Image (spheres, rainbow, N blue to C red):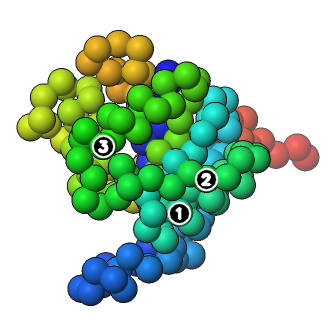
Amino acid sequence: MILFLMRHADAGTPRGNPILDGKRSLIKEGKQQCMLMARLLSAVKAPVDVIVSSPLKRAMQTAQLMGNELGYDEEVEVSQALGLNASYTDFQRLVEKYADREGILAVGHNPNLFQFLGRMVSGNGGSSIRMRKGAIARVDLERHPAQLQWLIDPRAARAIYASVTKSSRPKTSRK
């Protein structure tokens, strides 16, 4: 199975009140990040059989935009195992639930995803791997510990996209 872990896209400035913070929506930049990262997953022909999201609004919006752009026809599933207070055990149960699938896109938050990803690939609880907003990590779960195949954030994806869309032919004038 392949797990695509995605940190929710940019939702602006965090709010001090946890109730208001949970209702924060993606900003324009966050929506653009989703479109870019969905194009990236399409370009690498990522097998996404199921999309699971944290229940918070910004993660749900990220998951739904990704699903729309990927042509995902199913409903985005919501799981507390990707929420702010989720434990690694909750996360493991979520992954086990979809063990029969080829690919899962899981959308969550900092610091949980950092810790989950670090623990999966290192095999211990003290490691974490930083992910920027909108970043996606591809993890191969067939090995133990799991193997991180790649981790890319919207900045890097934008730079790659810009470099491949430029013409590689030198400009010459024909007079």
Look at mark 1 in the image and give the residue it sits on.
Answer: 60
* Disc number placed over residue 90 in the picture, else none: 3
Q: Is residue 155 visible in this depiction of the protein?
A: no
Mark in front: 3 vs 2: 3
User: Which comes before the other along the chain, label 3 or label 2?
Assistant: 2
Identify the residue at horizontal 61%, vertical 53% (top origin): 76
Q: Is residue 131 visible in this depiction of the protein?
A: yes
Query: Which residue is more in the foreground, 11 or 44?
Result: 11
* Disc number placed over residue 43 in the picture, else none: none
- Please determine whether, in this image, residue 41 is positioned above or below residue 122: below
Query: Which residue is more in the foreground, 97 or 37?
Result: 97
Q: Quadrant of residue 149?
A: top left
Q: Would you say the residues marked 1 and 2 are in contact, meaning their CB atoms lie under 8 Å apart?
A: yes
Q: Amino acid at mark 1?
A: Met
Distance from disc 3 to disc 2, alpha carbons, whole Å, reads 18 Å
Look at mark 2 in the image and give the residue it sits on.
Answer: 76
User: Which comes before the other along the chain, label 1 or label 2?
Assistant: 1
Distance from disc 1 to disc 2, alpha carbons, whole Å, reads 8 Å
Residue 24: percent from left, percent from top: 44, 79
Q: Amino acid at mark 3?
A: Asp
Identify the residue at horizontal 27%, vertical 29% (top origin): 120
Query: Which residue is more in the foreground, 50 or 29?
Result: 50
